[in-house]
Image: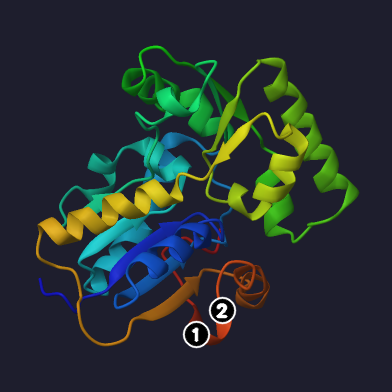
Amino acid sequence: MDKTQPIGVIDSGVGGLSVLKWLSKKMPREHFIFLGDTARIPYGDRPREELIGFVRELTSYLDRRNIKQLVVACNTITTLGVDVIGRGYDFDVIGMVKGSPELQRISRKHRVGFFATDFTVAAGSYKKEIERLNPDVKAFGLGCPKLVPLIEGEKFDTPEMEAAINEYATIMKSWDVDTVLLSCTHYPFLKEEIQKALGPAITVIDPAAMTTERAYRNLAERGLLNDSGEGSLEICFTRDVERCKRLASRMLDVNECVFHEVTLEASQG
């Protein structure tokens, strides 16, 4: 491998663009290839074995593009385990950060919530990791199945979106948490709205920043940080590129990006 090879970023849809934003700011000289599987969104309510098949197709595509690192910008995919995702490849796999020792300091009440997909919550790994890193903290996960379809459907500033956010915020507040992680990469598209619904007494955290630091350190330790030239952003989707481009404009300067539609095996289903 050499420094000029691209970094691959995968997601089930457009949510991972919130992570790509952090990555490109932290590493402006890198070449990124983002791949969102918009033909098969949402992933959050699919069986594990089906998801593994999808992720192998995404990963194989980026392996053919000769990437030096794979960032999994999707909490549902991260829940599968990076060992499953990266098995048999030369590049390292960086999953979404599930928790941080900082939560013990940030949360005064030591009660931390996280919004996620049903799959992520049911798997239990996020709750386990938060409580492992912070022995005094109690973690509460809430599946929010209405949010991803509304975001992907561009239903911002609609009564449906407001109702869904308020529904989940009410439940979360009933657990008396003072810190909430957005443990689905789609949810930072709604960070301001979620913060408003939860109120000023609750701190809302986007784990993308911590994930970006992990990706940066990994490349630095391997001597693969690109330290010359200008970076680039290639953004690929498996369906609905124009819609996705509109959503991308909420996170990135689309004039600096190149957009493509790509076909994966079985992605037409």
Q: Look at the picture and state if 205 lies above or below 137.
A: below
Pointers 2 and 1 in contact (CB under 8 A)?
A: yes
* Residue 77, horizontal then vertical, whole percent: 42, 44
Residue 156: image location, x then y, percent:
78, 57
In the displayed structure, 106 sits above or below 61; it is: above
Vertical side of 176 occupied by 184: above or below: below
Q: Position of residue 72 (x, y in %)?
A: 37, 52
Residue identifier under label 2:
253
Q: Nearer the viewer, residue 120 or 30?
A: 30
Q: Which mark is residue 48?
A: none
Q: Is residue 90 visible?
A: no
Which residue is the site of mark 1? 256
Identify the secondary structure beneath mark 2: loop
Residue closer to the observer: 18 or 81: 18
- Relative vertical location of residue 79 with respect to residue 208 in this rendering, above or below: above
Question: What is the quadrant of residue 168 in the picture?
Answer: top right
In the image, taking residue 170 as reference, residue 51 lies left or right, namely left
